[in-house]
């Protein structure tokens, strides 16, 4: 009795030339199976890349992070502005910003460039600053 096997690609019965070593009825089924598997492998590559790229995207500072970055330069001012912002934004407070609040904010934002302490000085010995108007890092 001749033992037949089932082709892994087309599902058809075939008589293997070498038992165990052959998974397909023909070379065309073998290559079609291989070709059909290729797009799946190609798809996996961009998925893997996008996962690797995610941290890079995450490093792009959001507005919130920019605000906290600004705060790095002057923790006291950062805390002050956070307190002012909380007083203004908190719905529970349910009160309009006082003139003092606005003046405090103006005073804070009058300082356009905030020093960034955890960055090295540039080759000219200038200190890194965060430009709160453009959101850029500048050396001054
Ligand atoms: Zn086949």
Image (tube, grey):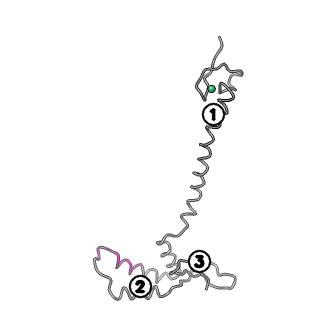
The first of marks 3 and 2 along the sequence is 2
Disc 3: residue Cβ within 8 A of ligand 1's nearest atom: no
The first of marks 1 and 2 along the sequence is 1
Of the two numbered discs 1 and 2 in the rendering, the one whose residue sits closer to the viewer: 1
What label sits on residue 105 in the rendered view?
2
Callout 3 touching callout 1 (CB < 8 Å): no
User: Does 135 sit above or below residue 59?
Assistant: below
What label sits on residue 33 in the rendered view?
1
What label sits on residue 118 in the rendered view?
3
Residue 133, image x and y in percent? 50, 81
* Helix, strand or loop under label 2: helix
The first of marks 3 and 1 along the sequence is 1
Q: Main secondary structure of the magenta part?
A: helix
**Quadrant assignment for ligand 1:** top right
* Helix, strand or loop under label 3: loop
Residue 31, image x and y in percent? 67, 33
């Amino acid at each position: 009795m001749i033992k037949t096997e089932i082709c892994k690609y087309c599902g058809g019965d075939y008589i293997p030339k070498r038992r165990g070593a052959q998974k397909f009825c023909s070379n065309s089924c073998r290559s079609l199976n291989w070709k059909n598997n290729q797009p799946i492998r190609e798809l996996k590559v961009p998925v893997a890349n996008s996962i690797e790229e995610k941290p890079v995207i995450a490093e792009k500072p959001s507005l919130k992070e920019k605000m906290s970055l600004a705060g790095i330069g002057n923790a006291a001012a950062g805390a002050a502005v956070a307190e002012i912002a909380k007083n203004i934004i908190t719905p529970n407070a349910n009160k309009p910003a006082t003139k003092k609040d606005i003046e405090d904010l103006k005073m804070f934002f009058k300082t356009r460039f905030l020093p960034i302490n955890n960055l090295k000085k540039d080759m000219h010995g200038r200190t890194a600053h965060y430009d709160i108007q453009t959101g850029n890092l500048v050396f001054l």
